[in-house]
Image (tube, coloured by chain):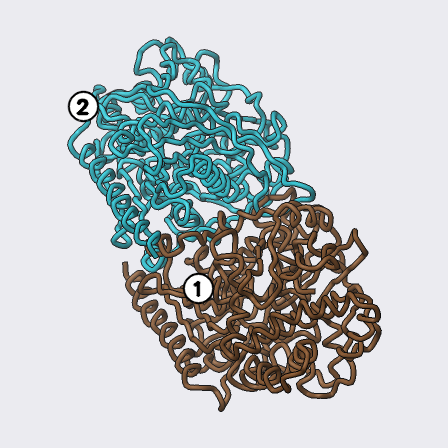
Chain colours: A brown, B cyan
Amino acid sequence: MAPCASLLLPVFVILATLPIIQSVPTFFPRPSYDQSLAKQPKASKPKIPYKTHYFPQVLDHFTFQPKSSKVFYQKYLVNSHYWHRGAPIFVYTGNEGDIEWFAANTGFLLDIAPKFRALLVFIEHRFYGESMPFGNKSYKSAETLGYLNSQQALADFALLIRSLKHNLSSEASPVVVFGGSYGGSRLKIPSQLLMLNGFDSLFLVFNEKVSLLSLSVLAAWFRLKYPHIAIGALASSAPILQFDDITPWSSFYDAVSQDFKEASLNCYEVIKGSWAELEALSAQKEGLAELSRTFRACQDLHSLDSVWEWLWSAFVYTAMVNYPTDANFLMPLPAYPVQAMCKIIDGFPSGASKITRVFAAASLYYNYSRAEKCFKLEHEPDAHGLHGWNWQACTEMVMPMTCSEDSMFPTSSFSYKEFAEDCMRTFGVQPRPHWITTEFGGKRIELVLKRSGGNIIFSNGMQDPWSRGGVLKNISSSIIALVTEKGAHHVDFRSATKDDPEWLKELRRQEVEIIQGWIDQYYPDLKRTNKE
Amino acid sequence: MAPCASLLLPVFVILATLPIIQSVPTFFPRPSYDQSLAKQPKASKPKIPYKTHYFPQVLDHFTFQPKSSKVFYQKYLVNSHYWHRGAPIFVYTGNEGDIEWFAANTGFLLDIAPKFRALLVFIEHRFYGESMPFGNKSYKSAETLGYLNSQQALADFALLIRSLKHNLSSEASPVVVFGGSYGGSRLKIPSQLLMLNGFDSLFLVFNEKVSLLSLSVLAAWFRLKYPHIAIGALASSAPILQFDDITPWSSFYDAVSQDFKEASLNCYEVIKGSWAELEALSAQKEGLAELSRTFRACQDLHSLDSVWEWLWSAFVYTAMVNYPTDANFLMPLPAYPVQAMCKIIDGFPSGASKITRVFAAASLYYNYSRAEKCFKLEHEPDAHGLHGWNWQACTEMVMPMTCSEDSMFPTSSFSYKEFAEDCMRTFGVQPRPHWITTEFGGKRIELVLKRSGGNIIFSNGMQDPWSRGGVLKNISSSIIALVTEKGAHHVDFRSATKDDPEWLKELRRQEVEIIQGWIDQYYPDLKRTNKE
């Protein structure tokens, strides 16, 4: 179900009481969909070999514990193919999930490493992949999950980088941190928990996409909090301003809608009108049966929710990955998939129902390979238990979102009270909705970073709805916003391809130039400091 | 016993195994001395009324806990006499101990408040004064003390300031943080723990002076980590570089010695020679009895340790407070007390022993009022149990110190291994000697802060031995070092007096001017941001 629709239809009132959905509205991937794709591509193996290491990491950096600090083993990967002692170190501040997949799928770093003779380091994020502080009990309860948060993760990076440089006898190497890329690891990552239990229902989902988003934010925060460890950060598609009340809560869905409206006004209107049509149909006798047929459900549908969610995911994610070339990021898709979807919607004869049109459009997302005969719209509770991102959303990563009248989704509001109640019910934890802005700032960010901070690139593509929570204007001569009108979700971090348009090549060229500038500044600075 | 002497004399071998002393060598006030001063001045009451508040503070900012976060009540004081909504807020980042005493003794803030129409806020530091997270069990064990550290304290300040501004409906008020002042609260603060149990001895002391020093560091760190909350910081006498291996470990005692050498070479040589003379005497039959008489001990001495420590404290603290006017900071003392001490030493007839001379010099520190008939050189274990600073020294605030051949103290080295063993024995905790530089930086600080950070004044007086661990050169156009040759420990934070020399008036004038500059920059910045 689309969270934006939660207040519109009685059937969704259950879910309207579950503001977790509202706060993290794009976190609803459906593994059943994934599994339903017969031609799901195999995750590619890394192009360049790297070595796996494990770092004995401190569990709690900020509370000293009796005896020695409890440690866990944090995985990290190193590629030293181009590097020599003293040369730059590029650190990818890990996302949720197996770090190998991120290393294998962050082409940009591999592309630029030779030019900089850079060491590449991919650090796995605590509580993901193999870096489980409490083994398979890591997600057991609030007691263990309490250690999963951004400040602990940043301190992990700091400690590991410092230790690594020490062990390499290369303390003076400049470090640049990168955050933003996804990793394409959906086959490997436990991807979702969805539980629906009637009126006492619990709707929690884990979505690697969004925790990724938060972690691209980590690269920027790392530079702000640990300038002594990283000389600069490239934060691609980092919605650093998506917290608290900094960015209008409706901006995300307005931006999704804008993408479709720009492609075709009719397309936007069809989607906008489809929700009511779906509701009306489902209210009819045999309505669900008809929907099951229309949506080619592998099994008979039990509620309209699944259809809404299925459609909603397709539109939101397609907007995010509205890339200028064929790509297989979240799903295999053609170039400019939003335009392709709208072409499908607009291409029907005038008498066709909105339902038929939106189904056809969404099929592009789920079945571009045309291998699917039916779709698994309803899914099973995830065996992996509560997953990391939901915990983070229920503690610090509170991102309220709503759908306005202008969006193509049904209008919805956000109730913090309900959200908090739900988090308490689910995790036994109280969210701290103002904590991120207290710890990392964000309000009046230009004012703050004009007189502090430096060497950060905020890169955003306006096709990506997350761009609305990003930094879109230069703040100072060294805090730079690179904005592309046609860019989508961290398109710059993808491997270069022969089909890349000029604006994308130019974007990457600018990024490389700015990073080169930091490094060209750093070495003379260092020389001067050493002389003194 | 002077830690620097720990390796010289067999009698001190016990203490030589106790590197806590070595790491925090100036933290040895002796309440018995205090009590022995008949004319110990009563702590003055605040000149300006303030209101006491209590803030429900989060115990652990960095680990989310089940149910709701545990809170404790953090005390803070507000003076709004000159303030109006939107005007600046000056925050004193609290030291250990009752915040009222700091408020009452930080004259500089009271002096400049009218000019800035500033709200004055004094925030008590967690685990000190009334702000005890676990009531009278706060110091019970490593489990409770674990929450006593600088990062938690900084987050306390951030949360409290933000909440305060919100409650005052004055979110846009610029905040400037101040750290450095002592507070003169030695009568109120539980001041020392000294336990000597033979060869398995434990020598731990708590000294408000030094935790104060660390907390002046907090103001600078706060600006670096929370630039979105404070627009600037004045960190007076902040030994931000006293950690790890940034500053030579011998620099502190070399600086103390330098003060005395500058006053008189003979004076320096007499003190330097006195330790061996004391050792020789104590080794003689009836030596301790003779020392008891010479040092006018109220009770017969049991070891030479007390004499060494008594002398050592007098020299170190007098160097720190070598103020240009009569003052009563640590003790009532005349203007330029180092010079006064050396005048005493130099004034003896040529045949006088070094022991006689150093006793007379130290008596200036302990008995300037001449009220004392005898001195309590040996002291009792403190009933308050383990105190905060020792915990901090055994966890994050590891400041190794040694005495070089050039110092006027016996040479000594620092053994991290022994230090760590001692901390484990005492608190059951493992120190993290590189943590402060990992979390806050410090190494190559010019290089780092040149490209990040801004709006910090590091003020240091070269008479103060802590200055050697301070920032003594401008780093950028807005990270300014104000250094006075004749200044001592945060002399700038003391109330202005009619006797202040020109250089001190000029120092304060510069500080006010720079702070005014930040504020003059801030409001137009704010206006511009609000327009956008």
Q: Report which residue position mark 2 lands on.
A: B499
Three-letter amino acid code at disc 1? Glu
Q: Which mark is residue B77?
A: none
Q: Is residue A315 above or below residue B405?
A: below
Give the quarter of the figure containing the N terminus of chain A: bottom right
Q: Report which residue position mark 1 lands on.
A: A171
Estimate how packed mark 1 is, as few (under 14), some (14 to 19) or many (20 or more) residues with alpha carbons within 10 Å.
Answer: some
Classify residue A10 as left or right of residue A455: right
Classify residue B70 as left or right of residue A116: right
Q: Is residue A508 above or below residue A196?
A: below
Residue occupying the point 56% across, 74% down = A268
To which chain does the residue with label 2 belong? Answer: B
To which chain does the residue with label 1 belong? Answer: A
Image location (x, y in percent) of residue A416: 61, 48
Image location (x, y in percent) of residue A421: 69, 46
Estimate how packed mark 2 is, as few (under 14), some (14 to 19) or many (20 or more) residues with alpha carbons within 10 Å.
Answer: few
Residue occupying the point 79% across, 51% down = A200
For the view shown, which residue lies furthest in the bottom direction? A498
Classify residue B472 as left or right of residue A441: left
Dot 2 falls on a residue whose secondary structure is: loop
From the viewer's side, name the closer residue of B88 and A154.
Answer: B88
Give the quarter of the figure containing the C terminus of chain A: bottom left
Image location (x, y in percent) of residue B301: 48, 17
Residue occupying the point 61% across, 83% down = A333
Quarter where residue B422 is shown: top right
- Tally of numbered tags: 2
Image location (x, y in percent) of residue B498: 18, 22
